[in-house]
Image (cartoon, grey):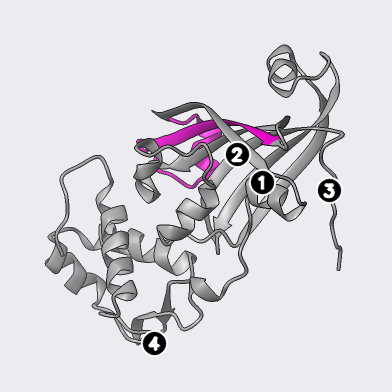
Amino acid sequence: MKLENNDIPIYYQIENLIRDKIENSEYATGEKIPSERELGEICGVSRMTVRKALDNLVNEGILERRERQGTFVARDNLNEFTTLVGVSEYIESEGMKPNIKVINKELIKPDKSITKNLNLNSDEKVILVERLILADKRPCGFEQSYIPYPICPELLEVEIDQKSIYAMLRRNGHKPTKAKDQTSAILSNDKLSKLLQIDSKEAILKNIRTSFSKDRPIVYSYNYYSGEDFVMTRIVF
């Protein structure tokens, strides 16, 4: 396994190498993979580094640990989980045409709250993407999304105006499967009023979302929607 000398942490690189071997069927479903010690020797890294990589893959449901047996490629892999859709996909499902305008995209050092919610090390960076969401050419939402840089570095390199961030994550093997939402009504400030083309101090919806690939957080976002454009429907069991 060849590791690169770049900005992507070593344990993320090990994760991606294991993903590639699973996708290429070098590690088959249900097959035992090399031990932490063996992977450490192959990659030339410590067992602790390997363990962090394996922990993340277990949390995503790609690998599973069996007591006294080792680590195996999970039978219930991510391709079998329910897909979580992004706002552009939601707009399409409502029969409208989404249009996405990227306002800002940069690599940043996250604050303590974002670091905690994405379960990152203190020295890890994230990609901040700020986008204006339009439905049938009408501004209806503004989103600020924070994505760990190593899981999808190409977000910085490619144009994503009309692309779903969730779709790009799925292509990288990080399939969003669930989310935790915190939704509240707030009064719009001057910046949001201008972006959403609404009156100042008008009531809007604020949604803080943590998106997960199984149990691993992969996106933390602040989303703001004009009240008349979005209806929230929940089914409670």
Residue 110: horizontal and vertical position, in percent?
A: 46, 31
Which element carries disc 1, helix, strand or loop? Answer: helix
- Label 3 belongs to which residue? 232
Q: Residue at x 55, y 37 (%)?
A: 145
* Among the two numbered marks 1 and 2 on one chain, the one whose residue lies closer to the N terminus: 1
| Residue type, numbered disc 3 | Met
**How far apart are the alpha carbons under marks 2 and 4?**
35 Å
Q: Residue at x 68, y 39 (%)?
A: 208
Closer mark to the observer between disc 1 and disc 2: 1
Quadrant of res 74: bottom left
Mark 4–mark 1 CB contact (< 8 Å): no
Which element carries disc 4, helix, strand or loop? Answer: loop
**How far apart are the alpha carbons under marks 1 and 2?**
12 Å
Mark 2–mark 4 CB contact (< 8 Å): no
* Among the two numbered marks 2 and 3 on one chain, the one whose residue lies closer to the N terminus: 2
Q: Nearer the viewer, residue 212 or 83?
A: 83
Closer mark to the observer between disc 4 and disc 3: 3
Closer mark to the observer between disc 4 and disc 1: 1
- Residues in magenta, as a range: 109-134
Q: Which mark is residue 221?
A: 2
Closer mark to the observer between disc 3 and disc 1: 1
On whether residue 153 falls in the magenta region, the answer is no
Can residue 183 be seen in this snapshot? yes
| Residue type, numbered disc 1 | Val
- Label 1 belongs to which residue? 87
* Among the two numbered marks 4 and 1 on one chain, the one whose residue lies closer to the N terminus: 4
- Label 4 belongs to which residue? 30
Residue 118: horizontal and vertical position, in percent?
A: 51, 45
**How far apart are the alpha carbons under marks 4 and 1?**
35 Å
Mark 3–mark 1 CB contact (< 8 Å): no
